[in-house]
Image: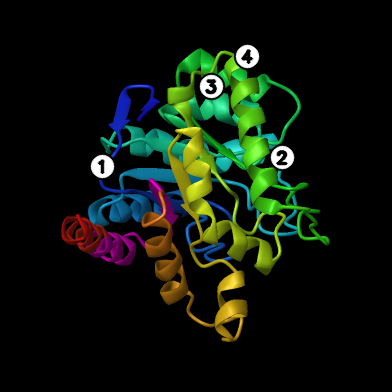
Amino acid sequence: MIFRARQFTFTFPRPVLLMGIVNVTPDSFSDGGQYFDSTAAIEHALALVREGADIIDVGGESTRPKAAPVSESEELRRVLPVIEALAGQVRIPISIDTMKPAVARAALRAGASIVNDVAANRDDAEMWQAVAGTQAGYVAMHMQGTPQTMQTAPTYQNVTGEVNEFFANRLGRLSAAGVTPDQVVLDVGIGFGKTVEHNLQLLTQLRSFTRLHRPLLLGVSRKSFIPKVSGDSDTADRLGGSLACACWGVQRGINIVRTHDVAATRQALRLTEALASRRSDVEQ
């Protein structure tokens, strides 16, 4: 299985890729405001690369529940200086985390190689045409509703089945827009239009999504369902739960883990992979 993102090619199976998060926002749920200044964001991204990030994901608009949308011009003001600076300094793919086709196009011109689209449930093909025209990588994430509505009583008859159907539909629509399968990564969208129980069901059944033969991305880092399951307060450190879910996912077919905490996640995943490979040898 191959994932292509412009000049970058990843061939699976291989060690899990780490996507380091850089939020250039004042209001993201975990680190909002910490890297809002472009200089701080660039320094943080470079630190994540030193910690072992394989991809840097830059976002200029919070997608936490009920987050206020930002204008296209403001989002561009936030992300372009960061992407332009990183493109001249790093040799790994830069991803733009955006729902806006114009922002994606500008970011790709500035040096990004991947579009991370939480709004892959869109009806229009403009974003997909931008991806097709540049041969960029594309992360298609499942979300019910929008960031403003997604946590208002999300409902499914069968969450795993419906997310699988969504992915099959998106792959067809992406192909029709000129995006080849090897440009596409799938993300089940933990926390995006899902209850705690929906999140747990998806995590339990991650392996079902491998039938689509595309790399799977898991984004669980510091998410609010973690203390709800563990019984901790909402303000508790969520690193332990984030690592548990990441290690669980890797054993069930996940290929890319999106994380705020690259160094800790890298260590946990490399140990998980080493143990899993030896377990296979013993079981054979």
Tag in front: 4 or 3:
4
- The residue range painted magenta reads 254-272
Q: Secondary structure at mark 2?
A: loop
Determine whether label 4 and label 2 are within 8 Å by CB.
no
- Point out the residue furthest to the front here: 284
Distance between the Cα atoms at labels 4 and 3?
12 Å
Identify which residue, 206 or 134, lies in the foreground.
Answer: 206
Tag in front: 2 or 1:
1
Q: Position of residue 112 (x, y in %)?
A: 43, 31
The residue labelled by disc 1 is 14
Q: Amino acid at mark 2?
A: Ser
Q: Secondary structure at mark 4?
A: helix
Is 178 on the left-hand or right-hand side of 67?
left
The residue labelled by disc 3 is 131
Query: Around disc 1, counting alpha carbons within 10 Å, would you say few (fewer than 14), some (14 to 19), or many (20 or more)?
Result: few
Q: Earlier in the sequence, mark 2 or mark 1?
A: 1
Query: Around disc 4, counting alpha carbons within 10 Å, would you say few (fewer than 14), some (14 to 19), or many (20 or more)?
Result: few
The residue labelled by disc 4 is 176
* Residue at image location 22% in from the left, 64% down from the top: 275
Identify which residue, 34 or 247, lies in the foreground.
Answer: 247
Tag in front: 4 or 2:
4
Q: Is residue 44 above or below residue 119?
A: below
Q: Earlier in the sequence, mark 4 or mark 1?
A: 1
Q: Is residue 35 magenta?
A: no
Q: Position of residue 187 (x, y in %)?
A: 54, 45
Q: Quadrant of the C terminus?
A: bottom left
